[in-house]
Every structure is written in structure tokens, then in C-alpha cells.
Amino acid sequence: MKKSDPRYQNRYPFTGKLICGECGSSLKRHINSTGSLKYPVWVCKQHLDDVSACSLKYIREVDLEYAFTIMMNKLFFGRQEVLHALIEAVRGETHKGNLLRIDEIDQRLEKIVE
């Protein structure tokens, strides 16, 4: 499989979505092992290249799944206060942005007519 292949890019649910809070680099999935125990973790790419570049060692995938589930539940139960308010804010910003663009085009047209 090549890296440009879409199946390679979408292999795991968190692929391409996790960013290191320390250095801003993306996180990559690895399998850690402790004795006979093997478990998936997400490691900062910067840390993989140079250990001194970033201090984030790894985050267990189980912990990420747990945090994701908690946040989705919070969004679901608080959707009226959070998501609907966000949608309205985005709609308002888009509308304001369109009005600003229309005003800018009108000003350009006036200059052209002059």
C-alpha cells in the first residue's frame, strides 16, 4: 500500500486528526509492548524523529477513545446550548462576510464607473 492510497490514510479513526499539544506536530499510531502485553498508542512524529524535540512520549488509544466518548456525550446532551449556538454564530458570520464582500464589490464597481 502506498501512502497516497486513500485506504492508507483512513486506516484508523484518529488518523490525521490528532495534533501534539506540545509542538503542534501530528500523532502517529504505534504498538507498545510491555512484556507480553501489547497495546496501541499514539506518538508525536516530532518525538519519533528526535526525542529531545518534543517531550510527549505517547497517549494510549484507550484513553483517547475514552476522552472522545466523553466529549461526544457532552456535545449530545448540551447540543441546544453549544451546537445550535455555534451553528447560528457560523450562519451569522457567513452572512456578515457575504455583506462585506458585496460592499467591497460595490465600491470597486463605483471606482470602475468613475
Image (tube, rainbow, N blue to C red):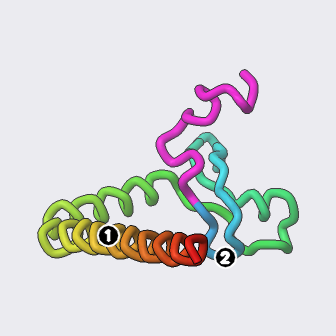
First reached walking from the N terminus: tag 1 or tag 2: 2
Residue found at x 51% / y 48%: 14
- Contact (Cβ within 8 Å) of mark 1 with mark 2: no
In screen coordinates, is 22 left or right of 78? right
From the top left corner, tell me how far across and down residue 1 is, in percent.
72, 21
Do we see residue 33 in this rendering?
A: no
Name the foreground residue: 99 vs 20. Answer: 99
* Pointer 2 residue: 22
Foreground disc of the pair 1, 2: 1
Task: Magenta stretch: give its range.
Answer: 1-18
Q: Residue furthest top?
A: 1
Residue found at x 76% / y 72%: 54
In screen coordinates, is 25 left or right of 97? right
From the top left corner, tell me how far across and down residue 102 is, in percent.
42, 70
Name the foreground residue: 105 vs 81. Answer: 105
Do we see residue 49 in this rendering?
A: yes
Residue found at x 12% / y 69%: 80
Q: Quadrant of residue 113?
A: bottom right
Q: In the picture, which quadrant includes the C terminus?
A: bottom right
In screen coordinates, is 35 left or right of 61? right
Please say whether residue 114 is one of the residues in the magenta stretch: no
Dot 1 amino acid type? His
In screen coordinates, is 6 left or right of 102? right
From the top left corner, tell me how far across and down residue 75 is, in percent.
23, 65
Q: Residue furthest front?
A: 114
* Pointer 1 residue: 95
Dot 2 amino acid type? Glu
Mark 2: few/some/many CA within 10 Å (<14, 14-19, 20+): few
Name the foreground residue: 36 vs 7. Answer: 7
